[in-house]
Image (cartoon, rainbow, N blue to C red):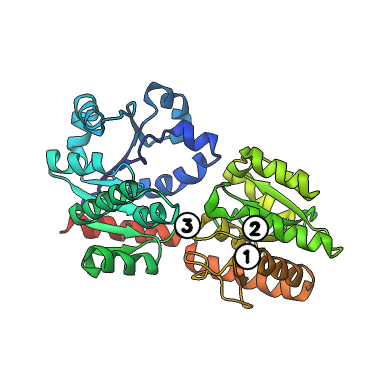
Amino acid sequence: MDKISLTLFFTAGVSLEAWAAAGNLDRELTLYKKLLPHLKKISLVTYGGKSDREFSSHIEDLRLLCVPWQRWQQLTALHLTAKYFPQLSAADVLKTNQIRGAQVPIWLKKIFRKKLIVRCGFLHGYFTRQQGADEKRIQEAVSLERTAFTDADLCVVTSAWQKEAVVKDYGIAPGKIKVIPNYVVTGMFKPDPGIEKKFDLVFIGRGDRQKNLPNLFEALNILKNKGRRYSLRLVGACCESDDLRREAQAKGLDVTFSGNVPNFQLPAVLNEAQVFILPSLYEGHPKALLEAMSCGLPCIGAEVPGIREEIRHESNGWLCRTDPESLATAIETVLGNEALRKILGENARKHVVGNYDIDRIVELELEALREVVQK
C-alpha cells in the first residue's frame, strides 16, 4: 500500500503554545514523530495562528497548518480551506485529537471527500454531564459527540468501557470502533533507584472538581490529627488554585506546590515520591496514572470509571472510595507497608510495559490508518 498522508486536527482553540504551557508539547508530539517514518506526511492543524510558528523547531518534519480559532467554527473551516487548500486536498485521512473541535474536520471531510478518524481520549458527553453542566451544555456535548461518531469512517476510544458506552448511547456498530489506549514512553518513565525519596505522595493534574483534591486534603488532615503527618507534592495546573493553597495552609498540611513541569521531566518528579495518588471522581484513561505506574510507583486510586480498569486492587495498585476516610485509610495502609509498596510498584510497571508502551500504540495507530483507507 502507498504511504498515507495524515492531517491531525487539534482540540478546539488549542495551540502548540497551549501544549507547551501545560508541559505536554514533547509528549503529545512523540507519537506523531514515531508515526512519521511509516507515513508519507503528517500535518498538524493548530489554532494559535502565527504564534504557533515559534514552536516550529519542536515539530521537526511534521507540517504545521496554523490558523486563529474563530468563535464561529465555520469561519475557522473556511480560513483553513482558503489558506491550505492544496495541503488539505493532498491528505488521505483527517483525524481529530478530541471530540471538542471535531466539527471543523467533519465539514472538511465533506468538502474534500476524505476519510475521517474521530478520536477521543475521554467521552465529551459523559464528562460534561459529570461536571454538573446545565442541560443545554450537556445536550450540545451529546449532539456533537453523536454527530462525530456517526459521520466518522472510524471511531477511536482509549478504553473498552468507553467503546461499550459509545455502542450503547449512540448505536454505533462495534466494528466501527477501535480501542487505542493512551501510550507511555516506558523507556523514559521507569524506576530510578538512584533518586532520593523526598515526598510521601505525589499528585499530577488539574485542580477542578473532578480531581477531588479537597477530599484528599481532608484525608491528610484526618491522618495529621492522628499523629501521622504525610507530605504531598502537587504538580500541574492544580497549583494555580488559590483555594487549594489557602486550604492547605488553613489545615497546616505539608503540601508542596510545584507548578507545571515539562512531561519529560516528570520521571524524576515521580521517582522522588513514595506513592502516586489519584482521588478523582471519574477519569477517561488517565495518562498521569499510567506514567506513575510505569515508573514503578505504588498507586492509590479511587474506584471509579477510568481508574478501576487499570488498578487491580492489592495486585498492581490500591483502590479506595472517594471520601476522606477511605482515602486516609488507603494512604495509611500503603505508606505503612514497605513490602506491599514494592509488590504494587513492580506489578504496576509490568502492567504498563505490557499494555501501553508507545511502540505497541504506534502499531495500533498504523492498523487504524490502513483500515480506514481501505474502506
Query: What residue appears at the point 60 percent right and 53 percent down from the top-left corner?
Result: 188
Q: Look at mark 1 in the image and give the residue it sits on.
A: 323
- Using a 10 Å C-alpha cutoff, classify the residue at mark 3 as few (fewer than 14 neighbours), some (14 to 19) or many (20 or more): many
Q: Look at mark 2 in the image and give the residue it sits on.
A: 215
> What amino acid type should be assigned to the residue bearing mark 2?
Asn
| Mark 2–mark 1 distance (CA, rounded to whole Å) | 6 Å
Check whether the beta carbons of the residues at disc 2 and disc 1 lie within 8 A of each other: yes
Dot label at residue 183: 3
| Mark 3–mark 1 distance (CA, rounded to whole Å) | 30 Å
- Given residues 308 and 20, the one toward you in this image is 308
Residue that sits furthest to the bottom in the current view: 314
Q: Position of residue 45 (x, y in %)?
A: 32, 35
> What amino acid type should be assigned to the residue bearing mark 3?
Tyr
Tell me: 285 left or right of 374: right
Quadrant for the C terminus, please. bottom left
Image vertical order of residue 100 relative to residue 21, above or below: below
